[in-house]
Image (cartoon, coloured by chain):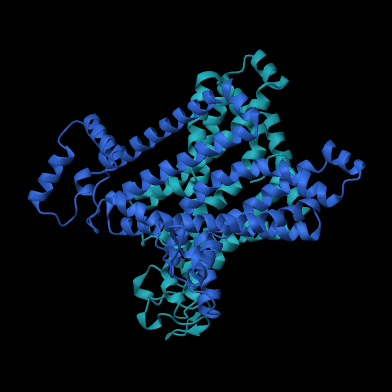
Chain colours: A cyan, B blue
C-alpha cells in the first residue's frame, strides 16, 4: 500500500465525519444507522428468545398485544405474532436478514461495477462501448421490473434474491466509476505513474480508484437503502425470500392479514423498523452527497 | 430526423429481441419447459401431446424460432387456470393498470411541481428543508408499506375510502373507466396516491434542481432588469426551461410506474396486470407470467422510443449528438 493512497483515504474519512457532524439531522441518522448495524451483528445476544427455536414458542402466547406477559413471566414488549413469537426477537432477526442481504448485494455489485467501470474508462474504445451499452440497457429498465422478471423465471430463494439485486445494481456503480475515472485518467499523476513504468492494474487500483471513491461511497449508501427496500418489496409480494429466512419485508407481509382485524403490531413494528433503517441510510447518503460532490446530480 | 428515428427504432427492436432471448433462456434452458408450460395435473398423454406441439424434442435454436414466431402471432400459450389465451387475459386487464398509472402520474405532477418550485425558489429555507426531508421520506418508504398505512388510516380507522377493488365503472366516449363514476373515483384515490408518492419525490427534486440551475442564468437577470414581474419570470421563463428534463424523466418514469403498479395492485386488489402477474406466479400459471413479461417489456420499450423521439423534437442537440 503506498503512502499517498493511505493519505487520501485518511482525508476522505476526515471529510466524511466532518461533513456529517455539521448537520444535526445527519448526525442523528448516522447514530441510528450504527445502532441498527450493531444490533443486527450481535442480534442473537440481544434477543430474549430465538424466534426459530420451536421449543421456546408457545401457541397459547400468539397474538398477544405489546407489553403483555407470557405464562413463564417473560415480557413481550412489542407483542407476539400468530405463532406466539416475540416480535422484538423476530424483528432483530429480520433486521439481520434485511441488512445482510442489502449490504452483501451492495458490496458485490460495487465490486463488479467498479471493475467494469474502471476497465471501460481506462481502455476505452470497443470495450468501453460494449460495457456501456449493457449498462445503458440495464439502467433503462426499472429495478423492480428486472428483479420481478428474474424471480418470476427463477423462483424464490435467498441466493436468487441476492443475485437479482446484484444484477440490478452493478450498472449504477459502473457508470459512476467510469465517469469519475475518465476525469482522473487524464490527470498528470496518472501520466507520471505510466512514465515510471508502473503496471496497469496497479495504476488502476492504487492510483485512480482511491480518487473515484467519493461518488462510490455516496452511491453505495443509497444503493444499500434501495436494495433493502427492494428486497422487502419482493418478499412482501411473496416472490422474494422464502418463509424460512424472514426479513423485515416478510414479517410485514405475515402481519398484513391481521392488520385489518386490529392486531396492528405484528405488521406495524417491523414496518417502522424498516422505515427507520432505510430513511436514516438515505439521510446519511444524501448528506454525504452534499459534502463530497455537490454536482453529482439529483435523483 | 428520419435517420435518428430509424436508428432509434432499430435499437428498440434489438432490445426487444434481447429480452425475448432472455425470457426464452429463462424458461427453456434453465428450467424444464415441460414442467413450466404443462399444467401440473396433466396426464402423461396430454404431456406427450404438448411436448410434441411445442417441439420440445427439437434443438434449442429451432425451439427459439418457434417461440418467437408464435409470440409474433400473439400466441403466448394458454393460461392453466383460466384456460384462455394468456395474451387475451393481459389485454383485458391492461386498461385498469393504465388508468391507475396515469392517475398516479397526474397526482405526482400536480403536487410535485408546485412543491419543487417553492423549494427551489427559497433554497435552504425552513420550508425547503421540510420539503426536501419529506421527499427523502417519500422514497425511503417502501411502496407496499405506504399502501398498507394508507389502508389502515383511511379505510380501517377513518372509514372514508374503500381499500379494495376498482368499484363501479362508467362509460364515456366508449371508454370504460372508474374515472367516470363517483364510486369508481373513491376506489381510485388510495391506489393512485400510493403509486404516485414515490414519483412525487422525484418530481419535487427535479423541479427544485431545475429552478436552482435556471434562476442564476443571464436571461433571468435580463428579464428582471427589463422590469418583468417575478411571477412572470418564474411561471413563464423559468418554467419552460424546467419542463424539458421533466418531460423526459416523466416519460421514462411512466414505464417504471407500470412496473411498480404490481405492488400497488397487489395491496389494493386492483384488477390490473400487476395483480394478475403475482396471482399467476403464486398459481404457477407460467404462460401468463411469460406473456406479462413480454407485454410489459414491449410497452416499456415503446414508451422509451416515443420519449426519445419527442425529446429530439424539443431539443435538437439530442438528435445531433445521436448522429455523430
Residue A13, quarter of picture? top right
The answer to whether residue B201 is above or below residue B149 is above
Q: Nearer the viewer, residue A4 or A299?
A: A299
Q: Can residue A48 be seen from the camera position used here?
A: no
Q: Quadrant of the N terminus of chain B?
A: top right
Residue at 47% x, 79% y: name it: A263
Q: Tell me residue B197's x, y (percent).
A: 58, 59
Q: Tell me residue B91's x, y (percent).
A: 36, 52
Q: Nearer the viewer, residue B187 or A108?
A: B187
Q: Nearer the viewer, residue B160 or B316?
A: B316
Residue at 69% x, 45% y: name it: A289
Q: Tell me residue A158's x, y (percent).
A: 39, 52
Residue at 32% x, 47% y: name it: B291
Residue at 27% x, 45% y: name it: B76
Q: Tell me residue B115's x, y (percent).
A: 71, 57
Tell whether B275 sits left or right of A104: left
Q: Can residue A256 be seen from the camera position used here?
A: yes
Amino acid at each position: 500500500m503506498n503512502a499517498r493512497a493511505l493519505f487520501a483515504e485518511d482525508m476522505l474519512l476526515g471529510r466524511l465525519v466532518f461533513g456529517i457532524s455539521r448537520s444535526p439531522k445527519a448526525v442523528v441518522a448516522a447514530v441510528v444507522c450504527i445502532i441498527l448495524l450493531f444490533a443486527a451483528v450481535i442480534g442473537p445476544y440481544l434477543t430474549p428468545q430465538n424466534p426459530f427455536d420451536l421449543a421456546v414458542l408457545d401457541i397459547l402466547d400468539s397474538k398477544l398485544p405489546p407489553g403483555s406477559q407470557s405464562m413463564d413471566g417473560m415480557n413481550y414488549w412489542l407483542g407476539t405474532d400468530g405463532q406466539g413469537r416475540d416480535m422484538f426477537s423476530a424483528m432483530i432477526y429480520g433486521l439481520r436478514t434485511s441488512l445482510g442481504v442489502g449490504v452483501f448485494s451492495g458490496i458485490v455489485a460495487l465490486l463488479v461495477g467498479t471493475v467494469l467501470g474502471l476497465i471501460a474508462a481506462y481502455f476505452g474504445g470497443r470495450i468501453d462501448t460494449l460495457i456501456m451499452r449493457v449498462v445503458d440497457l440495464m439502467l433503462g429498465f426499472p429495478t423492480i421490473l428486472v428483479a420481478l422478471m428474474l424471480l418470476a423465471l427463477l423462483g424464490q430463494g435467498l441466493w436468487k434474491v441476492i443475485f437479482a439485486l446484484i444484477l440490478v445494481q452493478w450498472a449504477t456503480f459502473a457508470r459512476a466509476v467510469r465517469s469519475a475515472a475518465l476525469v482522473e485518467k487524464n490527470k498528470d499523476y496518472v501520466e507520471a505513474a505510466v512514465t515510471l513504468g508502473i503496471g496497469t492494474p496497479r495504476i488502476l487500483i492504487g492510483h485512480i480508484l482511491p480518487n473515484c471513491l467519493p461518488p462510490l461511497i455516496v452511491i453505495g449508501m443509497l444503493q444499500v437503502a434501495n436494495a433493502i427496500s427492494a428486497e422487502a418489496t419482493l418478499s412482501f409480494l411473496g416472490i422474494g425470500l422464502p418463509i424460512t429466512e424472514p426479513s423485515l419485508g416478510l414479517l410485514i407481509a405475515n402481519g398484513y392479514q391481521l392488520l385489518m382485524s386490529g392486531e396492528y403490531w405484528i405488521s406495524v413494528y417491523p414496518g417502522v423498523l424498516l422505515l427507520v433503517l432505510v430513511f436514516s441510510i438515505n439521510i446519511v447518503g444524501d448528506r454525504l452527497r452534499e459534502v463530497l460532490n455537490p454536482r453529482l446530480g439529483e435523483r | 430526423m428520419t435517420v435518428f428515428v430509424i436508428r432509434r427504432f432499430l435499437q428498440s427492436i434489438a432490445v426487444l429481441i434481447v429480452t425475448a432471448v432472455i425470457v426464452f433462456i429463462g424458461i427453456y434452458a434453465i428450467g424444464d419447459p415441460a414442467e413450466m408450460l404443462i399444467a401440473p395435473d396433466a396426464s402423461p398423454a396430454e404431456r406427450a401431446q404438448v411436448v410434441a406441439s411445442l417441439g420440445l424434442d427439437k434443438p434449442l435454436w429451432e425451439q427459439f424460432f418457434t417461440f418467437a414466431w408464435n409470440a409474433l402471432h400473439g400466441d403466448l400459450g394458454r393460461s392453466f387456470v383460466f384456460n384462455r389465451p394468456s395474451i387475451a387475459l393481459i389485454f383485458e386487464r391492461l386498461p385498469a393498470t393504465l388508468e391507475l398509472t396515469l392517475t398516479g402520474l397526474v397526482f405526482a405532477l400536480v403536487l410535485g411541481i408546485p412543491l419543487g418550485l417553492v423549494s427551489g425558489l427559497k433554497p435552504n429555507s425552513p420550508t425547503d428543508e421540510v420539503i426536501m426531508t419529506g421527499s427523502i421520506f417519500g422514497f425511503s418508504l417502501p411502496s407496499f408499506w405506504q399502501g398498507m398505512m394508507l389502508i389502515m388510516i383511511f379505510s380501517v380507522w377513518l372509514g372514508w375510502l374503500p381499500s379494495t377493488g376498482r368499484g363501479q365503472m362508467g362509460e364515456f366516449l366508449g371508454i370504460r373507466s372508474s374515472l367516470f363514476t363517483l364510486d369508481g373515483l373513491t376506489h381510485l384515490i388510495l391506489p393512485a396516491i400510493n403509486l404516485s408518492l414515490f414519483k412525487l419525490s422525484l418530481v419535487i427534486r427535479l423541479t427544485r434542481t431545475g429552478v436552482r440551475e435556471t434562476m442564476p442564468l443571464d436571461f433571468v437577470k435580463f428579464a428582471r432588469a427589463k422590469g418583468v414581474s417575478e411571477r412572470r419570470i418564474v411561471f413563464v421563463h423559468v418554467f419552460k426551461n424546467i419542463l424539458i428534463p421533466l418531460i423526459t424523466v416523466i416519460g421514462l418514469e411512466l414505464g417504471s410506474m407500470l412496473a411498480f403498479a404490481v405492488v400497488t395492485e397487489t395491496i389494493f386488489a386492483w384488477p390490473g396486470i400487476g395483480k394478475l402477474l403475482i396471482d399467476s406466479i403464486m398459481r404457477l400459471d407460467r404462460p401468463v407470467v411469460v406473456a406479462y413479461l413480454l407485454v410489459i417489456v414491449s410497452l416499456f420499450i415503446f414508451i422509451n422510443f416515443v420519449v426519445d423521439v419527442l425529446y429530439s423534437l424539443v431539443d435538437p442537440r439530442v438528435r445531433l449528438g445521436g448522429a455523430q
